[in-house]
Image: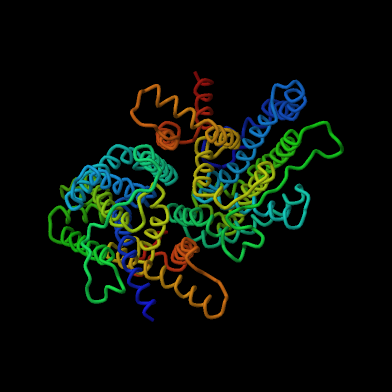
């Protein structure tokens, strides 16, 4: 039982990262209807930027906002320069461009920082507290930062004029344009925000998994799964989905281990984590494409 | 007779396919088939050269599979490396465990991959565009793990993979093993391209393109969309799977980590660069994939040195930039671009 609680707790911590990535994916999906396959590599690139800042002697909490800002600008630049001309292009072209971006950021990180594994120390203080046997300080920190980020975003979209304009641009571009919203720039802002959220996700997960160019491939897959479970059109749902997937991942592996220990039958374990994500993705996509909290999209005939 | 197929490029291709081009094609194939005699005996092409040629043809078949699905039916797949892997493993396991002759594994790999593709196509039916890309992306990322699954280990040999041996030419033919396999691969490729061409020229091919161009209109015309979409998924997987089986045989080795996500991307890039809706495009794409795999490192180093960059660029950077630029300049790939150029030249 104790082990199960431990697994759930660390699942929640992993889930926090998946939730961030899922949130970033949803930001882009809601405003442009695109699924950004380069999101994970962008986050990885940002994590490397944080590592670079740390190695220059900066404090983590100073480096993170700066890197988030830089990532924001990278995101805006990508939307304005690369995706804007493809506005009416077929889906395939857009997907191929995303794959191109993925390749570019992946290889640039390798070229600049090399392929050896690097470590980012956890920015959270080491202390003991009630229940510290179940969950580490870094994991708690991950969860707290994610929740704070979510609240901040919620406040931004709910209470600021810019947030309102962004929502309007996403929901009804034509009317928003008539009302004086600069829809094009809102899309770019959405991209920038997504990149910044990804930067937070990348630098949070880096202390837990080590930094290397391949680190995000599997995490992105879980981010996708989280976004789909929660509903890819709903930001709050994506965060919930991220947490759900994180816990599910650990609990399934735990149950698999338990089964193996008790009956000797091996079905599933840590080696099948990506397969679990694949199964989640396909199951959700086929059975309930709108996810738990998403809008059901109706095909107009 | 004017048929109602859309997409000008494709049909230009088709209209002229019968006449003079047929002769050129036959001549080219005969020349390629004579290469072991012309190039091998005179020492112009080494055994290694034949291996490279075989790999190009193998990738061309794999790319052709994706082109049938994406180019002619509009279903996007980022996970064709998975079917390539399945085909490769079917061949390797049959040779390794059951001592089958290599040629007998090809039809089995084809049939098995068709089944796998068909089954994967069933849920994919409900998905379109980005969602399908997402599902196949997940498949591609998960494949190495699935191949390492503990209960498969007794025949997949886990992480270590399977070593097999390249077959010797039969009937005491005076050819090296590489030259013989080159001929086998070439023969399979000619057969597969011929079938693909006839398939696309048939009622089925027109149905596939109709679904791609306007799914709803196609189903109003009485085309069974679900049936064609799943079947073409199976056929596409069959093509790529046969390519995988051939790859395993000429490469003499399979292992889970040779089928990572990068392979799926390479196949996609081949299709996009060659020309997503064109059979000659598949050949260009196959050559491109192998050339890039072989020379990208050297090329990137030269480029880096030429522009005096302070860091060692990696091939993937060039790859990515090339992909994006291509989407702007030639969305129909090299084959599409050439066809367009040809049309303009003829008009002026």
Question: Does residue B327 appear to the left or right of A261 in the view shown?
Answer: left
A147, above or below B326, in the image = below
**Quick one: B326 or B68, which is closer to the camera?**
B326
**Quick one: A77 or B41, which is closer to the camera?**
B41
- Residue A38 in the image: state x and y as whole percent: 37, 47
Q: Is residue B216 visible?
A: no
- Residue A52 in the image: state x and y as whole percent: 26, 43
B144, above or below A240, in the image = above
Q: Is residue B169 visible?
A: yes
Question: Does residue A153 appear to the left or right of A103 in the view shown?
Answer: left
B222, above or below A5, in the image = above
B317, above or below A290, in the image = above
Residue at (49%, 54%) from the top-left corner? Answer: B136
- Residue B280 in the image: state x and y as whole percent: 60, 34
Residue at (35%, 77%) from the top-left corner? Answer: A5
Q: Quadrant of the N terminus of chain A?
A: bottom left
**Quick one: B166 or B267, which is closer to the camera?**
B166
Question: Does residue A191 appear to the left or right of A278 in the view shown?
Answer: left
Q: Quadrant of the C terminus of chain A?
A: bottom left
Residue at (42%, 56%) from the top-left corner? Answer: A218
Q: How many labels does the image show?
A: 0
Residue at (36%, 53%) from the top-left corner? Answer: A210
Q: Outermost residue toward the right?
A: B171
- Residue B324 in the image: state x and y as whole percent: 40, 36
**Quick one: A48 or B185, which is closer to the camera?**
A48
Question: Does residue B258 appear to the left or right of A82 in the view shown?
Answer: right
């Amino acid at each position: 039982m104790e082990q199960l609680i431990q697994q759930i707790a660390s699942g929640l911590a992993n889930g926090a990262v998946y939730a961030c990535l899922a949130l970033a994916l949803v930001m882009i999906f809601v405003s442009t209807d695109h699924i950004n396959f380069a999101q994970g590599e962008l986050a990885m690139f940002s994590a490397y930027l944080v590592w670079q800042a740390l190695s220059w002697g900066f404090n983590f909490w100073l480096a993170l906002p700066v890197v988030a800002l830089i990532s924001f600008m990278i995101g805006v630049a990508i939307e304005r320069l690369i995706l804007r001309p493809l506005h009416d292009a077929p889906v395939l072209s857009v997907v191929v461009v995303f794959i191109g971006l993925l390749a570019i950021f992946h290889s640039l990180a390798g070229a600049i920082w090399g392929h050896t594994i690097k470590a980012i120390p956890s920015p959270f203080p080491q202390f003991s507290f009630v229940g510290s046997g179940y969950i580490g300080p870094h994991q708690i920190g991950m969860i707290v930062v994610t929740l704070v980020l979510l609240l901040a975003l919620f406040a931004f979209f709910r209470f600021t004029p810019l947030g309102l304009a962004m929502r309007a641009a996403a929901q009804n571009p034509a009317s928003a344009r008539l009302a004086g919203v600069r829809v094009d720039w809102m899309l770019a802002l959405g991209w920038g925000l997504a990149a910044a959220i990804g930067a937070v996700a990348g630098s949070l997960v880096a202390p837990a998994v080590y930094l290397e160019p391949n680190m995000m491939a599997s995490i992105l897959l879980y981010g996708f799964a989280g976004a789909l479970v929660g509903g890819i059109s709903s930001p709050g749902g994506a965060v919930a989905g991220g947490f759900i997937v994180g816990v599910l991942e650990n609990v399934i592996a735990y149950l698999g281990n338990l089964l193996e220990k008790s009956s000797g039958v091996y079905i599933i374990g840590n080696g099948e984590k990506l397969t679990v994500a694949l199964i989640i993705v396909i199951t959700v996509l086929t059975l309930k494409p709108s996810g738990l909290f998403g809008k059901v999209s109706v095909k107009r005939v | 007779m004017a048929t109602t197929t859309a997409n000008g490029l494709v049909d230009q291709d088709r209209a002229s396919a019968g006449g003079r081009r047929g002769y050129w094609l036959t001549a080219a194939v005969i020349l390629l088939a004579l290469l072991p005699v012309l190039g091998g005996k005179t020492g112009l092409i080494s055994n290694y050269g034949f291996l490279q040629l075989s790999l190009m043809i193998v990738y061309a078949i794999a790319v052709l599979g994706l082109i049938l699905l994406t180019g002619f039916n509009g279903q996007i797949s980022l996970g064709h490396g998975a079917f390539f892997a399945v085909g490769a493993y079917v061949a390797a396991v049959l040779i390794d465990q059951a001592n089958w002759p290599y040629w007998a594994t090809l039809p089995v790999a084809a049939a098995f991959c068709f089944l796998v593709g068909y089954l994967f196509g069933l849920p994919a039916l409900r998905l379109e565009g980005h969602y399908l890309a997402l599902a196949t992306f997940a498949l591609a990322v998960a494949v190495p793990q699935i191949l390492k699954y503990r209960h498969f280990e007794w025949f997949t040999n886990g992480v270590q993979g399977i070593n097999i041996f390249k077959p010797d030419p039969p009937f005491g033919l005076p050819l090296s093993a590489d030259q013989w396999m080159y001929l086998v691969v070439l023969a399979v490729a000619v057969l597969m391209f011929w079938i693909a061409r006839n398939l696309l020229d048939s009622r089925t091919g027109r149905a596939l393109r109709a679904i791609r161009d306007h799914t709803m209109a196609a189903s109003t015309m009485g085309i069974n969309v679900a049936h064609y979409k799943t079947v073409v998924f199976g056929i596409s997987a069959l093509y790529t799977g046969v390519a995988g089986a051939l790859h395993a045989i000429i490469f003499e080795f399979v292992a889970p980590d040779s089928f990572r996500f990068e392979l799926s991307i390479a196949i996609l890039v081949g299709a996009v660069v060659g020309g997503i809706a064109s059979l000659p495009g598949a050949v260009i794409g196959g050559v491109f994939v192998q050339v890039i795999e072989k020379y990208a490192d050297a090329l990137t180093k030269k480029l880096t040195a030429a522009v005096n960059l302070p860091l060692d660029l990696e091939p993937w950077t060039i790859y990515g930039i090339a992909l994006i630029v291509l989407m702007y300049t030639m969305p129909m790939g090299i084959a599409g671009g050439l066809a367009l150029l040809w049309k303009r030249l003829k008009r002026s």
